[in-house]
Amino acid sequence: MTQDRLAWRLGFLVLAACSTDSASPSNTGPATTGHPATTGSGGGAGTSGGSGGNTAGSGGKAGNTMSGGAGGATTGGAGGTAGSGTAGSGTAGAGTAGGAGTAGTGGGAGTAGSGGAGGSGTGGSNDAGSTDGSGVPDISGGDAVAPGGCSEPGPGPTPPTGFNRITTPMDTKFPFTTHWMGTFSETSSCVAMTSLTDLDNDGDQDFASGQRDQSSSCGVAGAPMIWWEYCSPDHWVKHTVGTGYQSAAAGGAGDFDGDGWIDLVVGNSWFKNPGASIKTSGPWMRYATGAPGRTEEITMGDLNGDGKLDALCVERSIQPQWWTPGANPTSPWILTILSSYQQQQGGAIADLDGDGKNDVLVGDRWWYKNPGDAGLWTPETIPAHPAFAPASTNGSEPMTMIGDLDGDGDNDFAVHTHWGGNIAWMENTDALGTMWAPHMIAPNGGVQAKSNLHGLLIGDFDNDGDADIFVAQNQGSVWIYENSGNRTFIEHLVASGPGHDARVADVDCDGDLDIVGKPWGNPNEPRGELAAPLRAHVYFKNELVERGGMAVFDRPKVEIWNVPNKGRCRP
Protein backbone atom coordinates (compact mmCIF):
# COMPACT_ATOMS: atom_id res chain seq x y z
CA MET A 1 0.00 0.00 0.00
CA THR A 2 1.48 3.39 -1.01
CA GLN A 3 1.53 6.60 0.95
CA ASP A 4 -1.26 7.90 -1.23
CA ARG A 5 -3.43 5.23 0.40
CA LEU A 6 -2.47 6.64 3.79
CA ALA A 7 -5.92 6.54 5.21
CA TRP A 8 -8.00 8.74 3.18
CA ARG A 9 -10.00 6.89 0.56
CA LEU A 10 -13.28 8.57 1.22
CA GLY A 11 -14.61 10.45 -1.74
CA PHE A 12 -17.08 13.22 -1.85
CA LEU A 13 -20.74 12.74 -2.71
CA VAL A 14 -21.66 15.33 -5.23
CA LEU A 15 -25.15 16.52 -4.62
CA ALA A 16 -26.66 18.53 -7.44
CA ALA A 17 -30.02 20.15 -7.08
CA CYS A 18 -32.00 22.13 -9.62
CA SER A 19 -35.14 24.03 -8.77
CA THR A 20 -37.50 26.26 -10.71
CA ASP A 21 -40.13 28.84 -9.90
CA SER A 22 -42.64 30.49 -12.23
CA ALA A 23 -42.05 33.92 -13.69
CA SER A 24 -44.71 36.60 -13.73
CA PRO A 25 -47.19 36.11 -16.58
CA SER A 26 -47.51 38.51 -19.51
CA ASN A 27 -49.89 41.46 -19.31
CA THR A 28 -50.68 41.28 -23.02
CA GLY A 29 -50.47 38.57 -25.63
CA PRO A 30 -50.69 34.84 -25.04
CA ALA A 31 -47.23 34.55 -23.54
CA THR A 32 -46.46 31.31 -21.76
CA THR A 33 -45.23 31.31 -18.16
CA GLY A 34 -41.42 31.34 -18.02
CA HIS A 35 -39.34 29.04 -15.82
CA PRO A 36 -36.63 30.97 -14.05
CA ALA A 37 -34.40 29.52 -11.32
CA THR A 38 -34.83 29.68 -7.61
CA THR A 39 -34.26 33.30 -6.56
CA GLY A 40 -33.53 36.74 -7.95
CA SER A 41 -34.92 38.45 -11.01
CA GLY A 42 -34.96 37.60 -14.67
CA GLY A 43 -35.38 34.31 -16.48
CA GLY A 44 -33.40 31.63 -14.77
CA ALA A 45 -31.47 28.77 -16.24
CA GLY A 46 -32.92 25.31 -16.16
CA THR A 47 -32.36 21.87 -17.55
CA SER A 48 -34.28 22.90 -20.63
CA GLY A 49 -35.33 26.40 -21.65
CA GLY A 50 -38.75 27.73 -20.81
CA SER A 51 -40.59 30.23 -22.91
CA GLY A 52 -40.23 33.92 -22.27
CA GLY A 53 -42.83 36.20 -20.82
CA ASN A 54 -43.41 39.79 -21.80
CA THR A 55 -43.42 41.32 -18.35
CA ALA A 56 -40.38 41.53 -16.14
CA GLY A 57 -40.66 38.44 -14.02
CA SER A 58 -38.92 37.06 -11.02
CA GLY A 59 -35.95 34.83 -11.63
CA GLY A 60 -32.99 33.44 -9.88
CA LYS A 61 -29.30 32.93 -9.97
CA ALA A 62 -28.01 30.52 -12.52
CA GLY A 63 -24.61 29.62 -11.13
CA ASN A 64 -25.62 26.19 -9.86
CA THR A 65 -27.76 25.07 -12.77
CA MET A 66 -26.50 22.72 -15.40
CA SER A 67 -27.85 24.27 -18.59
CA GLY A 68 -28.58 27.65 -20.08
CA GLY A 69 -31.71 29.74 -19.91
CA ALA A 70 -34.75 29.26 -22.06
CA GLY A 71 -35.13 30.94 -25.41
CA GLY A 72 -37.22 34.07 -25.63
CA ALA A 73 -40.44 34.70 -27.52
CA THR A 74 -40.26 33.86 -31.20
CA THR A 75 -42.60 36.60 -32.37
CA GLY A 76 -42.19 40.23 -31.42
CA GLY A 77 -44.72 42.99 -31.27
CA ALA A 78 -46.61 44.72 -28.57
CA GLY A 79 -47.42 41.94 -26.20
CA GLY A 80 -45.82 39.46 -28.53
CA THR A 81 -46.81 35.94 -29.30
CA ALA A 82 -45.16 33.64 -26.83
CA GLY A 83 -42.94 31.13 -28.61
CA SER A 84 -41.16 28.20 -27.09
CA GLY A 85 -37.41 28.05 -27.44
CA THR A 86 -35.06 25.15 -27.16
CA ALA A 87 -32.74 24.82 -24.20
CA GLY A 88 -30.23 27.60 -24.20
CA SER A 89 -31.31 29.12 -27.52
CA GLY A 90 -34.16 30.97 -29.17
CA THR A 91 -34.96 33.77 -31.54
CA ALA A 92 -35.35 37.21 -30.09
CA GLY A 93 -38.64 38.96 -30.62
CA ALA A 94 -39.08 42.59 -31.38
CA GLY A 95 -37.79 43.42 -27.95
CA THR A 96 -34.19 43.67 -26.87
CA ALA A 97 -32.58 40.21 -27.00
CA GLY A 98 -31.33 38.98 -23.69
CA GLY A 99 -31.96 42.22 -21.90
CA ALA A 100 -34.44 43.32 -19.32
CA GLY A 101 -37.84 43.26 -20.96
CA THR A 102 -40.60 45.68 -20.19
CA ALA A 103 -44.30 45.16 -20.60
CA GLY A 104 -45.21 44.86 -24.25
CA THR A 105 -41.77 43.87 -25.55
CA GLY A 106 -40.67 40.41 -26.52
CA GLY A 107 -38.70 38.11 -24.30
CA GLY A 108 -34.96 38.03 -24.68
CA ALA A 109 -33.05 35.06 -26.00
CA GLY A 110 -31.49 32.82 -23.41
CA THR A 111 -27.80 32.06 -23.60
CA ALA A 112 -26.63 28.67 -22.36
CA GLY A 113 -24.96 28.95 -19.02
CA SER A 114 -24.67 32.75 -19.03
CA GLY A 115 -26.49 33.84 -15.93
CA GLY A 116 -29.83 32.39 -16.94
CA ALA A 117 -30.98 35.16 -19.28
CA GLY A 118 -34.16 34.37 -21.17
CA GLY A 119 -37.72 35.22 -20.45
CA SER A 120 -38.42 38.81 -19.71
CA GLY A 121 -36.85 40.75 -16.92
CA THR A 122 -33.28 41.09 -15.77
CA GLY A 123 -31.07 38.01 -16.06
CA GLY A 124 -30.17 36.26 -12.83
CA SER A 125 -26.75 36.73 -11.33
CA ASN A 126 -24.02 34.13 -11.51
CA ASP A 127 -23.25 32.20 -8.37
CA ALA A 128 -19.78 32.59 -6.91
CA GLY A 129 -19.00 28.97 -7.59
CA SER A 130 -19.16 29.41 -11.33
CA THR A 131 -17.74 32.59 -12.76
CA ASP A 132 -19.10 31.91 -16.23
CA GLY A 133 -22.60 30.99 -15.07
CA SER A 134 -22.28 27.49 -16.46
CA GLY A 135 -22.89 25.78 -13.17
CA VAL A 136 -19.58 23.94 -13.63
CA PRO A 137 -17.06 24.64 -10.84
CA ASP A 138 -14.05 26.68 -11.87
CA ILE A 139 -10.68 25.01 -11.50
CA SER A 140 -8.88 28.17 -10.51
CA GLY A 141 -9.67 31.54 -9.04
CA GLY A 142 -12.52 32.57 -6.78
CA ASP A 143 -14.60 30.04 -4.93
CA ALA A 144 -14.20 27.04 -7.19
CA VAL A 145 -17.24 25.28 -5.76
CA ALA A 146 -20.29 27.19 -4.68
CA PRO A 147 -21.48 26.32 -1.17
CA GLY A 148 -24.41 23.95 -1.29
CA GLY A 149 -26.88 26.35 0.25
CA CYS A 150 -26.10 28.02 3.57
CA SER A 151 -28.44 27.18 6.42
CA GLU A 152 -28.38 30.82 7.54
CA PRO A 153 -28.84 33.21 4.59
CA GLY A 154 -27.26 36.60 4.48
CA PRO A 155 -23.80 37.82 5.39
CA GLY A 156 -21.90 36.37 8.28
CA PRO A 157 -21.57 37.92 11.73
CA THR A 158 -19.66 41.14 12.23
CA PRO A 159 -16.34 40.54 14.01
CA PRO A 160 -16.23 42.16 17.45
CA THR A 161 -14.01 45.08 18.26
CA GLY A 162 -10.50 43.85 18.87
CA PHE A 163 -10.42 41.15 16.22
CA ASN A 164 -7.27 41.49 14.12
CA ARG A 165 -8.66 41.18 10.61
CA ILE A 166 -5.82 40.84 8.10
CA THR A 167 -6.98 41.93 4.65
CA THR A 168 -3.54 42.70 3.21
CA PRO A 169 -1.32 39.61 3.52
CA MET A 170 1.76 39.95 5.68
CA ASP A 171 3.83 37.85 3.27
CA THR A 172 3.68 37.83 -0.53
CA LYS A 173 5.02 34.29 -0.89
CA PHE A 174 2.33 32.91 1.42
CA PRO A 175 -0.51 35.45 1.13
CA PHE A 176 -2.99 34.67 3.90
CA THR A 177 -5.94 36.78 5.03
CA THR A 178 -7.80 36.22 8.31
CA HIS A 179 -11.54 35.80 8.74
CA TRP A 180 -13.67 35.70 11.88
CA MET A 181 -15.60 32.45 12.33
CA GLY A 182 -16.96 33.02 15.83
CA THR A 183 -16.32 31.88 19.38
CA PHE A 184 -17.03 28.36 20.55
CA SER A 185 -19.33 29.44 23.39
CA GLU A 186 -19.54 31.80 26.33
CA THR A 187 -17.31 29.37 28.23
CA SER A 188 -14.72 28.75 25.51
CA SER A 189 -12.17 27.02 27.72
CA CYS A 190 -10.13 23.95 26.77
CA VAL A 191 -11.37 23.60 23.20
CA ALA A 192 -9.72 21.02 20.91
CA MET A 193 -10.94 17.83 19.09
CA THR A 194 -10.48 19.49 15.72
CA SER A 195 -10.94 18.22 12.17
CA LEU A 196 -11.40 19.90 8.79
CA THR A 197 -13.41 17.96 6.22
CA ASP A 198 -16.63 18.03 4.19
CA LEU A 199 -19.31 17.15 6.74
CA ASP A 200 -22.35 18.26 4.73
CA ASN A 201 -21.25 16.82 1.36
CA ASP A 202 -21.53 20.12 -0.47
CA GLY A 203 -18.00 20.11 -1.87
CA ASP A 204 -16.26 22.57 0.44
CA GLN A 205 -14.63 21.86 3.79
CA ASP A 206 -16.24 22.31 7.21
CA PHE A 207 -14.62 22.44 10.65
CA ALA A 208 -15.34 20.60 13.89
CA SER A 209 -14.18 21.34 17.44
CA GLY A 210 -15.13 20.18 20.90
CA GLN A 211 -14.71 21.07 24.54
CA ARG A 212 -13.01 19.07 27.28
CA ASP A 213 -15.53 17.42 29.57
CA GLN A 214 -15.68 17.94 33.32
CA SER A 215 -13.76 14.74 34.12
CA SER A 216 -10.51 16.62 33.31
CA SER A 217 -9.11 19.89 34.63
CA CYS A 218 -10.69 23.02 33.08
CA GLY A 219 -13.40 20.82 31.59
CA VAL A 220 -17.03 21.89 31.45
CA ALA A 221 -20.17 20.00 32.45
CA GLY A 222 -22.22 19.12 29.39
CA ALA A 223 -19.32 20.02 27.11
CA PRO A 224 -20.52 20.05 23.49
CA MET A 225 -19.06 19.03 20.16
CA ILE A 226 -19.66 21.64 17.42
CA TRP A 227 -19.41 21.60 13.65
CA TRP A 228 -18.90 24.80 11.68
CA GLU A 229 -20.65 24.97 8.30
CA TYR A 230 -18.61 26.84 5.69
CA CYS A 231 -20.74 29.30 3.69
CA SER A 232 -18.13 31.89 2.69
CA PRO A 233 -14.81 33.10 4.12
CA ASP A 234 -16.60 35.45 6.54
CA HIS A 235 -19.68 33.32 7.12
CA TRP A 236 -19.50 30.10 9.14
CA VAL A 237 -22.56 28.67 10.89
CA LYS A 238 -22.29 26.77 14.18
CA HIS A 239 -24.26 23.56 14.68
CA THR A 240 -24.32 21.37 17.79
CA VAL A 241 -23.16 17.80 17.27
CA GLY A 242 -23.86 16.48 20.75
CA THR A 243 -22.74 15.99 24.34
CA GLY A 244 -22.25 13.10 26.75
CA TYR A 245 -18.74 12.08 25.69
CA GLN A 246 -15.51 12.06 27.65
CA SER A 247 -12.39 13.53 26.04
CA ALA A 248 -9.38 15.43 27.29
CA ALA A 249 -8.73 16.94 23.85
CA ALA A 250 -8.88 14.12 21.30
CA GLY A 251 -10.97 14.16 18.15
CA GLY A 252 -11.00 13.17 14.49
CA ALA A 253 -13.22 12.29 11.54
CA GLY A 254 -14.06 9.39 9.25
CA ASP A 255 -16.97 7.55 7.64
CA PHE A 256 -17.24 4.82 10.26
CA ASP A 257 -20.51 3.25 9.10
CA GLY A 258 -19.86 3.41 5.36
CA ASP A 259 -22.93 5.50 4.48
CA GLY A 260 -20.96 8.13 2.55
CA TRP A 261 -21.23 10.81 5.25
CA ILE A 262 -18.23 11.69 7.40
CA ASP A 263 -18.74 11.07 11.13
CA LEU A 264 -16.84 12.47 14.11
CA VAL A 265 -14.90 10.65 16.83
CA VAL A 266 -14.11 12.27 20.17
CA GLY A 267 -12.45 10.66 23.20
CA ASN A 268 -14.53 7.60 24.10
CA SER A 269 -17.36 8.12 21.58
CA TRP A 270 -18.27 8.65 17.96
CA PHE A 271 -21.14 10.68 16.52
CA LYS A 272 -23.06 9.46 13.49
CA ASN A 273 -23.56 12.08 10.78
CA PRO A 274 -27.34 12.46 10.21
CA GLY A 275 -26.81 12.73 6.48
CA ALA A 276 -29.03 14.84 4.25
CA SER A 277 -30.68 16.50 7.27
CA ILE A 278 -27.36 17.56 8.80
CA LYS A 279 -28.09 21.29 8.55
CA THR A 280 -31.50 21.06 10.22
CA SER A 281 -31.32 18.00 12.46
CA GLY A 282 -30.89 18.01 16.21
CA PRO A 283 -27.98 16.33 18.02
CA TRP A 284 -26.25 13.48 16.24
CA MET A 285 -26.54 9.92 17.58
CA ARG A 286 -23.60 9.08 19.88
CA TYR A 287 -22.07 5.62 20.34
CA ALA A 288 -19.35 4.48 22.75
CA THR A 289 -16.13 3.19 21.20
CA GLY A 290 -14.56 1.78 24.37
CA ALA A 291 -11.49 4.02 24.03
CA PRO A 292 -10.23 5.84 27.14
CA GLY A 293 -12.09 9.07 27.83
CA ARG A 294 -8.88 10.72 28.99
CA THR A 295 -7.30 10.37 25.53
CA GLU A 296 -5.37 13.54 24.75
CA GLU A 297 -4.91 13.04 21.01
CA ILE A 298 -6.56 11.00 18.24
CA THR A 299 -4.95 10.52 14.84
CA MET A 300 -6.86 8.88 12.01
CA GLY A 301 -5.33 6.37 9.60
CA ASP A 302 -5.73 2.92 8.06
CA LEU A 303 -3.66 0.66 10.29
CA ASN A 304 -4.96 -2.78 9.32
CA GLY A 305 -5.03 -2.35 5.55
CA ASP A 306 -8.79 -2.69 5.13
CA GLY A 307 -9.22 0.72 3.52
CA LYS A 308 -11.07 2.13 6.52
CA LEU A 309 -9.93 4.63 9.10
CA ASP A 310 -8.78 3.58 12.56
CA ALA A 311 -8.19 5.84 15.57
CA LEU A 312 -4.74 6.08 17.19
CA CYS A 313 -5.15 7.17 20.83
CA VAL A 314 -2.34 8.76 22.85
CA GLU A 315 -2.09 10.07 26.41
CA ARG A 316 0.68 9.75 28.99
CA SER A 317 -1.36 7.59 31.40
CA ILE A 318 -2.25 4.97 28.75
CA GLN A 319 -0.25 2.77 26.41
CA PRO A 320 -0.25 3.97 22.79
CA GLN A 321 -3.14 2.09 21.19
CA TRP A 322 -5.48 2.09 18.25
CA TRP A 323 -9.16 1.27 17.92
CA THR A 324 -10.91 0.02 14.80
CA PRO A 325 -14.66 -0.15 14.08
CA GLY A 326 -15.98 -3.66 13.66
CA ALA A 327 -18.68 -4.92 11.31
CA ASN A 328 -21.17 -3.08 13.50
CA PRO A 329 -19.54 0.26 14.35
CA THR A 330 -22.24 1.04 16.91
CA SER A 331 -20.80 -1.74 19.08
CA PRO A 332 -17.55 -1.21 21.01
CA TRP A 333 -14.54 -0.97 18.72
CA ILE A 334 -11.59 -3.39 18.64
CA LEU A 335 -8.44 -2.51 20.62
CA THR A 336 -4.79 -3.03 19.61
CA ILE A 337 -2.02 -2.10 22.08
CA LEU A 338 1.26 -0.83 20.62
CA SER A 339 3.67 -0.71 23.58
CA SER A 340 4.33 0.77 26.99
CA TYR A 341 6.20 3.87 25.75
CA GLN A 342 3.56 6.34 26.86
CA GLN A 343 3.29 9.87 25.44
CA GLN A 344 0.97 12.82 25.99
CA GLN A 345 0.67 13.51 22.26
CA GLY A 346 2.78 13.34 19.10
CA GLY A 347 0.89 10.64 17.21
CA ALA A 348 1.20 10.41 13.42
CA ILE A 349 0.47 7.72 10.82
CA ALA A 350 2.32 6.98 7.57
CA ASP A 351 4.66 4.43 5.97
CA LEU A 352 8.11 4.98 7.52
CA ASP A 353 9.98 1.91 6.22
CA GLY A 354 8.80 1.81 2.62
CA ASP A 355 6.97 -1.53 2.81
CA GLY A 356 3.62 -0.07 1.76
CA LYS A 357 1.97 -0.37 5.17
CA ASN A 358 1.14 2.51 7.48
CA ASP A 359 3.31 2.68 10.57
CA VAL A 360 2.79 4.73 13.74
CA LEU A 361 4.96 7.52 15.15
CA VAL A 362 4.39 8.54 18.78
CA GLY A 363 6.59 11.38 20.00
CA ASP A 364 10.23 11.96 19.11
CA ARG A 365 11.77 8.69 20.35
CA TRP A 366 9.66 5.82 19.06
CA TRP A 367 7.86 4.59 15.99
CA TYR A 368 6.03 1.29 15.57
CA LYS A 369 6.46 -1.03 12.60
CA ASN A 370 3.25 -2.41 11.12
CA PRO A 371 3.39 -6.24 11.20
CA GLY A 372 0.71 -6.70 8.57
CA ASP A 373 -1.84 -9.46 8.98
CA ALA A 374 -0.17 -11.11 11.96
CA GLY A 375 2.34 -10.40 14.67
CA LEU A 376 3.14 -7.68 17.16
CA TRP A 377 3.81 -4.04 16.41
CA THR A 378 7.55 -3.58 16.89
CA PRO A 379 8.87 -0.41 18.58
CA GLU A 380 11.78 1.18 16.72
CA THR A 381 14.12 3.68 18.38
CA ILE A 382 14.72 7.24 17.23
CA PRO A 383 17.91 8.76 18.72
CA ALA A 384 17.38 11.44 21.35
CA HIS A 385 18.21 15.03 20.42
CA PRO A 386 19.32 17.63 23.00
CA ALA A 387 16.81 20.19 21.67
CA PHE A 388 14.09 17.73 22.62
CA ALA A 389 15.61 16.51 25.86
CA PRO A 390 13.43 13.65 27.06
CA ALA A 391 11.40 14.25 30.16
CA SER A 392 11.61 10.49 30.59
CA THR A 393 12.96 7.52 28.70
CA ASN A 394 9.83 7.72 26.60
CA GLY A 395 10.66 11.11 25.09
CA SER A 396 9.69 14.75 25.41
CA GLU A 397 6.09 14.43 24.18
CA PRO A 398 6.29 16.93 21.29
CA MET A 399 3.89 17.57 18.42
CA THR A 400 4.76 15.61 15.26
CA MET A 401 3.72 15.45 11.61
CA ILE A 402 4.87 13.09 8.85
CA GLY A 403 5.73 13.98 5.25
CA ASP A 404 8.41 13.72 2.57
CA LEU A 405 10.32 16.86 3.46
CA ASP A 406 13.39 16.35 1.28
CA GLY A 407 11.66 15.03 -1.83
CA ASP A 408 13.54 11.72 -1.95
CA GLY A 409 10.43 9.53 -1.93
CA ASP A 410 10.45 8.38 1.69
CA ASN A 411 8.74 9.86 4.71
CA ASP A 412 10.43 12.13 7.23
CA PHE A 413 8.77 13.97 10.09
CA ALA A 414 8.57 17.47 11.57
CA VAL A 415 8.51 18.09 15.30
CA HIS A 416 8.16 20.95 17.78
CA THR A 417 8.23 20.97 21.55
CA HIS A 418 4.87 20.89 23.35
CA TRP A 419 4.08 24.45 24.48
CA GLY A 420 7.75 25.15 23.77
CA GLY A 421 9.80 26.91 21.10
CA ASN A 422 12.09 24.41 19.36
CA ILE A 423 11.33 23.24 15.81
CA ALA A 424 13.13 20.57 13.79
CA TRP A 425 12.67 17.98 11.08
CA MET A 426 14.01 14.45 11.19
CA GLU A 427 15.37 13.04 7.95
CA ASN A 428 14.76 9.37 7.21
CA THR A 429 18.23 8.81 5.74
CA ASP A 430 18.01 5.11 4.89
CA ALA A 431 14.33 5.11 3.84
CA LEU A 432 13.81 2.26 6.33
CA GLY A 433 13.27 4.29 9.49
CA THR A 434 16.38 2.89 11.17
CA MET A 435 18.67 5.90 10.61
CA TRP A 436 17.57 9.45 11.36
CA ALA A 437 19.37 12.79 10.89
CA PRO A 438 18.00 15.78 12.85
CA HIS A 439 17.86 19.24 11.26
CA MET A 440 17.11 22.20 13.53
CA ILE A 441 14.80 24.88 12.16
CA ALA A 442 14.44 27.04 15.28
CA PRO A 443 16.63 28.03 16.97
CA ASN A 444 19.05 27.99 14.06
CA GLY A 445 21.33 30.87 13.18
CA GLY A 446 19.26 34.01 12.92
CA VAL A 447 16.01 32.12 13.42
CA GLN A 448 15.07 32.46 17.07
CA ALA A 449 13.33 29.92 19.27
CA LYS A 450 9.61 30.51 19.69
CA SER A 451 7.24 30.07 22.62
CA ASN A 452 3.81 28.58 23.34
CA LEU A 453 3.83 26.44 20.17
CA HIS A 454 0.86 24.11 19.68
CA GLY A 455 0.20 23.90 15.95
CA LEU A 456 2.12 21.83 13.41
CA LEU A 457 1.16 20.95 9.82
CA ILE A 458 2.86 19.85 6.62
CA GLY A 459 1.55 20.91 3.22
CA ASP A 460 2.47 22.53 -0.08
CA PHE A 461 1.29 26.02 0.80
CA ASP A 462 2.90 27.78 -2.20
CA ASN A 463 1.94 25.15 -4.82
CA ASP A 464 5.52 24.58 -5.95
CA GLY A 465 5.41 20.80 -5.55
CA ASP A 466 7.29 20.32 -2.27
CA ALA A 467 6.21 20.14 1.36
CA ASP A 468 6.41 23.19 3.61
CA ILE A 469 6.00 23.28 7.39
CA PHE A 470 3.34 25.31 9.22
CA VAL A 471 4.00 26.21 12.87
CA ALA A 472 1.77 28.32 15.12
CA GLN A 473 1.57 29.62 18.62
CA ASN A 474 -1.50 28.87 20.66
CA GLN A 475 -2.36 32.56 20.31
CA GLY A 476 0.04 34.93 18.60
CA SER A 477 2.13 34.35 15.50
CA VAL A 478 1.77 31.95 12.59
CA TRP A 479 4.78 30.92 10.52
CA ILE A 480 5.38 28.87 7.39
CA TYR A 481 8.81 27.42 6.78
CA GLU A 482 9.32 27.38 3.03
CA ASN A 483 10.96 24.27 1.61
CA SER A 484 13.93 25.61 -0.35
CA GLY A 485 14.56 22.26 -2.03
CA ASN A 486 18.01 21.68 -0.52
CA ARG A 487 17.04 20.37 2.93
CA THR A 488 16.72 23.86 4.38
CA PHE A 489 13.63 25.82 5.32
CA ILE A 490 13.11 29.60 5.14
CA GLU A 491 11.00 31.29 7.80
CA HIS A 492 7.98 33.42 6.79
CA LEU A 493 5.74 35.21 9.29
CA VAL A 494 2.39 34.87 7.51
CA ALA A 495 -0.32 35.84 9.98
CA SER A 496 -1.27 36.51 13.57
CA GLY A 497 -4.04 34.73 15.41
CA PRO A 498 -4.80 31.42 17.12
CA GLY A 499 -3.13 28.23 15.92
CA HIS A 500 -3.82 25.61 18.59
CA ASP A 501 -4.48 22.24 16.90
CA ALA A 502 -4.85 23.98 13.53
CA ARG A 503 -5.99 21.94 10.53
CA VAL A 504 -5.30 22.28 6.81
CA ALA A 505 -7.39 21.65 3.68
CA ASP A 506 -8.50 23.47 0.55
CA VAL A 507 -11.54 24.91 2.32
CA ASP A 508 -12.97 26.94 -0.56
CA CYS A 509 -11.86 24.54 -3.30
CA ASP A 510 -9.85 27.06 -5.30
CA GLY A 511 -6.63 25.05 -5.59
CA ASP A 512 -4.56 26.25 -2.62
CA LEU A 513 -4.37 25.10 1.00
CA ASP A 514 -6.16 27.05 3.73
CA ILE A 515 -5.96 26.72 7.52
CA VAL A 516 -8.43 26.90 10.39
CA GLY A 517 -7.18 27.55 13.91
CA LYS A 518 -8.42 28.41 17.37
CA PRO A 519 -6.93 28.91 20.84
CA TRP A 520 -6.88 26.39 23.68
CA GLY A 521 -8.83 28.87 25.77
CA ASN A 522 -7.75 28.12 29.33
CA PRO A 523 -7.63 31.38 31.30
CA ASN A 524 -5.51 29.66 33.94
CA GLU A 525 -2.84 28.89 31.33
CA PRO A 526 -2.42 32.26 29.58
CA ARG A 527 -0.03 31.04 26.84
CA GLY A 528 -0.52 34.27 24.91
CA GLU A 529 -4.28 34.44 25.36
CA LEU A 530 -4.43 37.35 27.80
CA ALA A 531 -3.42 39.64 24.94
CA ALA A 532 -6.28 38.29 22.80
CA PRO A 533 -9.20 37.41 25.09
CA LEU A 534 -11.69 36.97 22.22
CA ARG A 535 -10.78 33.29 21.90
CA ALA A 536 -11.95 33.30 18.29
CA HIS A 537 -12.02 30.51 15.75
CA VAL A 538 -10.24 31.95 12.70
CA TYR A 539 -10.11 30.98 9.03
CA PHE A 540 -6.73 31.69 7.44
CA LYS A 541 -7.56 31.94 3.73
CA ASN A 542 -4.76 31.36 1.26
CA GLU A 543 -5.00 34.02 -1.47
CA LEU A 544 -2.33 32.44 -3.68
CA VAL A 545 -4.63 31.51 -6.59
CA GLU A 546 -6.64 34.74 -6.35
CA ARG A 547 -3.37 36.63 -6.77
CA GLY A 548 -2.40 34.79 -9.94
CA GLY A 549 -0.84 31.62 -8.60
CA MET A 550 -1.43 28.26 -10.22
CA ALA A 551 -4.21 26.10 -8.79
CA VAL A 552 -3.10 22.67 -7.59
CA PHE A 553 -5.41 19.82 -6.63
CA ASP A 554 -2.98 16.87 -6.67
CA ARG A 555 -0.90 17.24 -3.54
CA PRO A 556 2.65 15.98 -2.82
CA LYS A 557 3.35 13.04 -0.57
CA VAL A 558 2.48 14.48 2.82
CA GLU A 559 0.27 13.56 5.70
CA ILE A 560 -2.90 15.67 5.94
CA TRP A 561 -4.04 14.92 9.43
CA ASN A 562 -7.64 14.23 10.40
CA VAL A 563 -8.92 14.91 6.89
CA PRO A 564 -10.41 11.66 5.58
CA ASN A 565 -10.74 12.99 2.05
CA LYS A 566 -7.23 14.51 2.06
CA GLY A 567 -8.75 17.96 1.77
CA ARG A 568 -9.78 17.26 -1.81
CA CYS A 569 -12.59 19.22 -3.38
CA ARG A 570 -15.31 17.48 -5.27
CA PRO A 571 -14.45 17.06 -8.98
Image (spheres, helix red, strand yellow):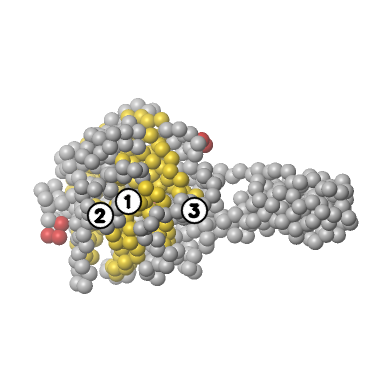
Residue tagged 2: 530
In which quadrant of the rendered view does residue 282 lie? top left
Circle 1/circle 3 CB separation < 8 Å: no
Q: In the displayed orientation, state which residue is furthest to the left.
A: 392
Tag 1: residue type?
Arg
Residue tagged 1: 535
Residue 4, which numbered label? none
Q: Nearer the viewer, residue 232 or 365?
A: 232
Left or right: 198, with 444 as reference point = right
Left or right: 143, with 404 as reference point = right
Circle 2/circle 1 CB separation < 8 Å: no
Local crowd size for mark 2, using a 10 Å CA cut-off: few (<14), some (14–19), many (≥20): some
Tag 2: residue type?
Leu
Q: Earlier in the sequence, mark 2 or mark 1?
A: 2
Residue occupying image coordinates x 35% and y 56%: 558
Badge 2 marks a residue whose secondary structure is: loop
Q: Nearer the viewer, residue 43 or 416?
A: 43
Residue occupying image coordinates x 40% and y 47%: 207
Percent x, y of residue 198? 45, 46
Tag 3: residue type?
Ser
Residue tagged 3: 232
Q: Nearer the viewer, mark 2 or mark 3?
A: 2
Percent x, y of residue 233? 46, 55
- Residue 284 to residue 541: above or below: above
Left or right: 204, with 453 as reference point = right
